[in-house]
Image (cartoon, rainbow, N blue to C red):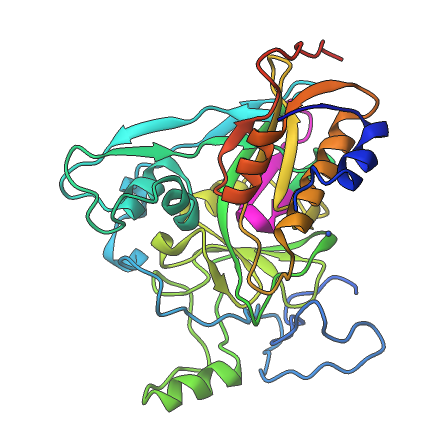
Amino acid sequence: MSLLVSTATAVLLLQSGVAGAAERAPGVGEVRAGETADSPRAGEEAETDTFVPPQEPLETEAIDEAEAGPTASELNPEEWPRQRHRFALESGIDVVGEEQTTTAQEEDTLLDIAMRYAVGYEEIRRANPEVDTWMPGDGTEVRIPSRYILPDAPREGIVVNLAEMRLYYFPAGEAVVETFPVSIGRLDWSTPLGETRVTEMLEDPAWYPPRSIREQAAERGEEMPVKIPPGPDNPLGRHAILLDIRGYLLHGTNRPWGIGMRATHGCIRLHPRDIEYLFGEITRGMPVKIVNQPVKAGWSAEGFLYVQAFPLFEEEEKSERDVLSMAVNRIAQVLGGYSHRVDGRELRTAVERRDGEVVRISRADAEARERR
């Protein structure tokens, strides 16, 4: 299937059936527990189940028992090898990075490899569906999904795309982007969308488990303290970055192998090494934009069009036709008034698979777009 696509033809493309059968800053001590994107805002009362001592931070999360791997107290974080994904930015270019491959060692799990290459749990599993998560096997080739299409958002501050569970950081005054895997809110505690900003930065924060979490622990026959002090077993890790959305923050973790999952109560969780680096880079007031873009499209440096698609969240009810329509609309936005030969089969396959792979959808005979 061959398509010549421009903004003007996007609507016809969909209609023709080719589409196949979107209060203020919480000061220290003001963060509320149990608040989500649907929670009451200014002027409304929000239920809180946690006492917040003055001048102390609060985190609303529980620990997900399904998260694998040892805790930070069982390891020396300074000895963890970890790749840093930092790429030059060029005007009009949306595709950054390069895919990599590595060979598993006998003692490796996929999570070990993901940690070394700074990719998330779901990312590494999607990229290697035939490889056993816990025993890849000595000599097994493992694909590292380290090529990205930048989200459709201003290239400033921090941009988090929930669909791919990845954070993009655009340092001020530098034509570069850095990207890190993150964990986000679970089905019942979704991470809110929108524009916000950094309001406070806390080093070695204490964690005050909400009453509801303590009650859950009690039902399991466990006793959870009212306060967990700073230290290697603190679920927040050593760094917390508060946002101008009450009850939500970016923070580290004491279980780094769980990064890249829907595992939090709404906050955005980073690997300890990543949050430590960002903590030294960002400043109060920096803009933060949280988006949910399961389909991204953009231009490579060679002038060809690519698409990257991710699984929808289970609560998002969309048909395959809806998702393909979403992809076509996004491609039309990227094209603007420019006409380009698009391979419809490659587009459909990428959207159906939704495995995060960056796929070229320019036809083989398409002319490369000139730099703008």
User: Which of the two residues, 217 or 20, is positioned nearer the viewer here?
Assistant: 20
160 in magenta: yes
252 in magenta: no
For the N terminus, the quadrant is: top right
Q: Residue 93 falls in which quadrant of the image? A: top right
- 259 left or right of 76? right
User: Which of the two residues, 327 or 15, is positioned nearer the viewer here?
Assistant: 15
User: Which of the two residues, 225 or 291, is positioned nearer the viewer here?
Assistant: 291
User: Where is residue 293 shown, x and y percent of the image?
Assistant: 65, 46
For the C terminus, the quadrant is: top right
Position above or below: 269 against 35: above
Q: Residue 302 falls in which quadrant of the image? A: top right
User: Where is residue 287 shown, x and y percent of the image?
Assistant: 72, 45
| Identity of the residue drawn at 79% across and 41% down | 15
User: Where is residue 151 shown, x and y percent of the image?
Assistant: 65, 37
| Identity of the residue drawn at 69% across and 37% down | 18
Q: How many labels does the image show?
A: 0
User: Where is residue 3 shown, x and y percent of the image?
Assistant: 69, 24
User: Which of the two residues, 203 or 276, is positioned nearer the viewer here?
Assistant: 276
- 67 left or right of 14? left
Visible residue check, residue 92: no
Position above or below: 53 against 181: below
| Identity of the residue drawn at 81% across and 80% down | 44
Visible residue check, residue 236: yes
Part of the protein shown in magenta? 159-175
| Identity of the residue drawn at 37% across and 53% down | 256
Position above or below: 62 against 101: below
